[in-house]
C-alpha cells in the first residue's frame, strides 16, 4: 500500500495569493481617533452669565428713592457762666495768661483771676520758703531744665513756696540779668504755669533783686 503524500508547506505561495487579491479585499487596520481638542477659554460674556445665573430683579427697582431729610442742627450751647467756667478750666490746666508787673529791679506775676491779696502776701515774704534753687553759674538751657524739675519735685512734695536764686547778672555780658529775664518768661508759660500760681521778687533778706519767690499750686491740682 502506497504511503500518502503530505502537502508541502509553502508560505510564499500564500503570500503570492494575497498579492493577487484585489485591494478592497485586503483588511486594513483602523486609524487611531484624533486627540480631543483643548477646552475653549470662557469669554467675559460666559463668566458674567455664570455670575448672574439664578439672579432675579429686585421688585420696584425703578422707584426713585427720596433723599434723607436734613439733620436738625442742634443749638449752640450757651450758659451765662460759660466764660467763667472756661477761665476756671484754664486756671486748673495752667494755660491761663499771667498778669506781669516789672521794673528794672522788681518783677512779679500772677495767674489771671488769682486773689490779689495772695500776691501781696507773697510780695511781702509772708509765705515760708520751704526750698530754694541756686542758679548761679548755670547757662540758660541748664537753668530751664533745673527749674522745671525743681518746681515739679517741690510741688509733688507738697511745698507751697520756694525761692529761685537767679543772681543780678553783674558778671554776665553787658551786666544783663539773663536768667532773671528768662525766669519771667518761663514762669508765665504753660510748661511752668501748671505748677505756678504767682511769683515775686524776693525781699532783701532772701536775695532781693537777685531772687524770686514762687507760689506753687497745691499738689494734685
Image (cartoon, helix red, strand yellow):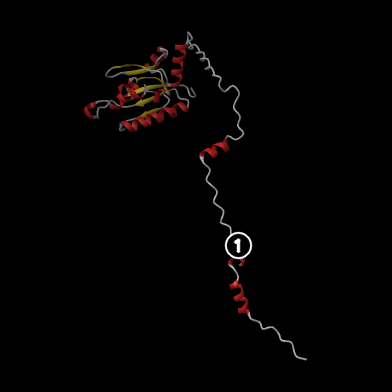
Q: Residues within 10 Å of mark 1 (few under 14, many from 20)?
A: few
Give whichever of 9, 172 is nearer the camera: 9
Considering every residue shown, the one lying at the far left of the view is: 174
Q: Nearer the viewer, residue 207 or 72?
A: 72
Q: Quadrant of residue 194?
A: top left
Q: Residue at x 60, y 26 (%)?
A: 58
Is 7 in front, or is 74? 7
Residue shown at the point (54%, 36%) measured from the top left: 48
Q: Position of residue 62 (x, y in %)?
A: 55, 21
Q: Is residue 118 left or right of residue 55?
A: left
Report whether 19 appears left or right of 136: right
Residue 98 picture quarter: top left
Question: Residue 178, position in %: x, y?
Answer: 28, 27
- Total number of numbered labels? 1
Rendered location of residue 207, percent (x, y): 33, 24
User: In the image, what residue occupies the spot 59% across and 21% down?
Assistant: 60
Quarter of the image with the N terminus in it? bottom right
Q: Name the residue at 54% across, 39% down.
A: 46
Residue occupied by mark 1: 30
Q: Residue furthest bottom?
A: 1
Location of residue 112 (image quadrant):
top left
User: Furthest-right residue in view?
Assistant: 1
Residue 101 location, x and y as percent? 32, 16
Q: Locate residue 119 relative to residue 106 in the image: left or right.
A: right
In front of the other: 207 or 192:
192
Q: What kind of element bears circle 1?
A: loop
Q: Is 208 drawn above or below residue 172 in the view shown?
A: above
Amino acid at each position: 500500500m502506497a504511503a500518502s503524500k503530505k502537502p508541502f508547506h509553502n508560505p510564499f505561495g500564500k503570500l503570492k495569493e494575497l498579492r493577487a487579491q484585489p485591494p478592497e479585499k485586503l483588511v486594513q487596520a483602523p486609524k487611531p481617533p484624533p486627540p480631543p481638542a483643548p477646552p475653549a477659554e470662557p469669554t467675559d460674556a460666559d463668566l458674567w452669565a455664570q455670575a448672574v445665573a439664578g439672579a432675579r430683579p429686585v421688585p420696584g427697582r425703578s422707584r426713585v428713592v427720596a433723599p434723607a431729610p436734613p439733620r436738625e442742627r442742634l443749638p449752640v450751647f450757651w450758659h451765662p457762666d460759660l466764660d467763667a467756667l472756661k477761665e476756671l478750666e484754664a486756671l486748673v490746666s495752667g494755660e491761663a495768661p499771667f498778669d506781669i508787673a516789672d521794673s528794672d529791679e522788681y518783677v512779679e506775676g500772677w495767674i489771671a483771676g488769682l486773689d490779689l491779696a495772695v500776691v501781696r502776701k507773697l510780695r511781702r515774704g509772708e509765705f515760708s520758703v520751704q526750698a530754694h534753687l541756686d542758679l548761679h553759674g548755670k547757662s540758660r538751657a541748664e537753668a530751664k531744665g533745673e527749674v522745671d524739675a525743681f518746681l515739679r519735685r517741690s510741688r509733688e512734695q507738697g511745698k507751697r513756696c520756694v525761692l529761685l536764686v537767679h543772681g543780678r547778672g553783674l558778671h554776665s555780658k553787658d551786666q544783663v540779668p539773663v536768667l532773671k529775664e528768662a525766669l519771667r518768661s518761663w514762669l508765665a508759660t504753660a510748661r511752668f504755669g501748671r505748677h505756678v500760681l504767682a511769683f515775686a521778687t524776693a525781699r532783701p533778706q532772701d536775695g532781693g533783686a537777685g531772687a524770686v519767690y514762687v507760689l506753687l499750686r497745691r499738689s494734685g491740682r
